[in-house]
Amino acid sequence: MTSTEIETSIAQGLRSTEYKARYDAACKRLLSEKVILAHILKAFAKEYKDSSTDDIANKYIEGKTMISRFSSEPDTVPPLITGIDTVQKNENRLGIVYDLLFQALVPDSEDHVELIINIEAQNEPNPGYPLPKRSIYYTSEKIADQKGRVFTKDHYEKIRKVYSIWICQNQPEYRANNVTHLHMACDSFVGDYQERECDYDLLSIFMVYLGGSEGDGKYKGILRLLDVLLSNKKSAVEKGNILKNEFGIPMTESMEKEFNNMCNLGEAIEQNGIQKGIKKGRHTTRLEDIQAIRKNLGYSLEQAMDLLNVPDDERSEYLTLLQERLEA
């Protein structure tokens, strides 16, 4: 590969990384809208199944902070979460960087019980390891991290429950439009005694797999909401209409801005991928042509490249690739 081609490849890689990073940031900003988080908590956290999304957004998300700083009128509530430090600092282990991390008040709890909520947006369908194991690690860290912060000494009764909700895009067909729930359970091993659920129900993980067909009967509710919200295929206007008409979510100026960003970045990512694919396809086709001429006509590699008018500055690359094929 020539220096020019190396520079071009590096530039394409950097552009692709930049586009994806900006796209991920836009996704996180959309997910940090309280109205969106309210729908997510309503769908997955059992503590909110009897609450309205308005109450979840305006009363319970960051409840203590909101109650002390703002009135209860909806128009005074900030639309985005403030959140808590997303970097898990630990002296003995490398830090974890969470996508979104915030607290939410449990409805009707006399002692203002709070939950810790973690939302993760995952765009890579095959990260190279089992994603559920990573989710368990993240959640366990947020439980362990509470000692010295939420409780001291042996006051384990004060441990707060942690929810971790993983929104996974671009999933293969067999996994798309599915949600799995990982949680702690109590089984009677000998006898029939049962522990109190409140004493062990401290970890709840939802793996939300998007990307399925709209014709799928499961493509509705929170799956449709999140798929529409994070899609780079739908326009800002189309997204706004679906969110408003189907879910009662009004389009805000910040949401419209992020929708437009995502559409533009999605097009840039796709175009960058197309250009890389064209180059790869061109190389593969030419390699096959060189091999066919060499085999069928008895030409040398140099003669085959002469016949195909391969530029001089590309020949060393093709010779290397052909040699690798011959040795394979």
Image: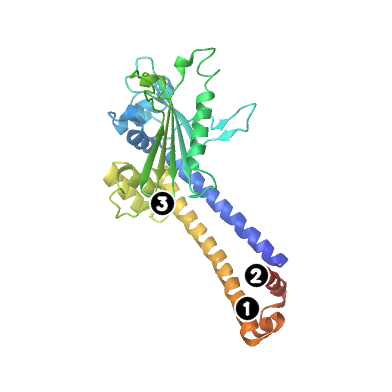
Residue 159 seen in the figure: yes
Res. 231 mark? 3
Q: According to the image, label 2 marks what residue?
A: 325
Q: According to the image, label 1 marks what residue?
A: 291
Identity, as a three-letter code, of the amino acid under mark 1 = Gln
Task: Give whichever of discs 3 and 2 has the lower sequence position.
Answer: 3
* 260 lies above or below 45: below
Circle 3 SS class:
loop
Task: Give whichever of discs 1 and 3 has the lower sequence position.
Answer: 3
User: How far across and how far down the image is residue 43, in percent?
Assistant: 33, 36
> Closer to the camera, 240 or 272?
272
- Distance between mark 2 and mark 1 Cα atoms: 10 Å
Task: Give whichever of discs 2 and 1 has the lower sequence position.
Answer: 1
* 230 lies above or below 60: below
User: How far across and how far down the image is residue 83, in percent?
Assistant: 48, 30
* Residue at screen point 36% across, 52% down: 212
Q: Looking at the rendering, in which quadrant would you find the N terminus? A: bottom right
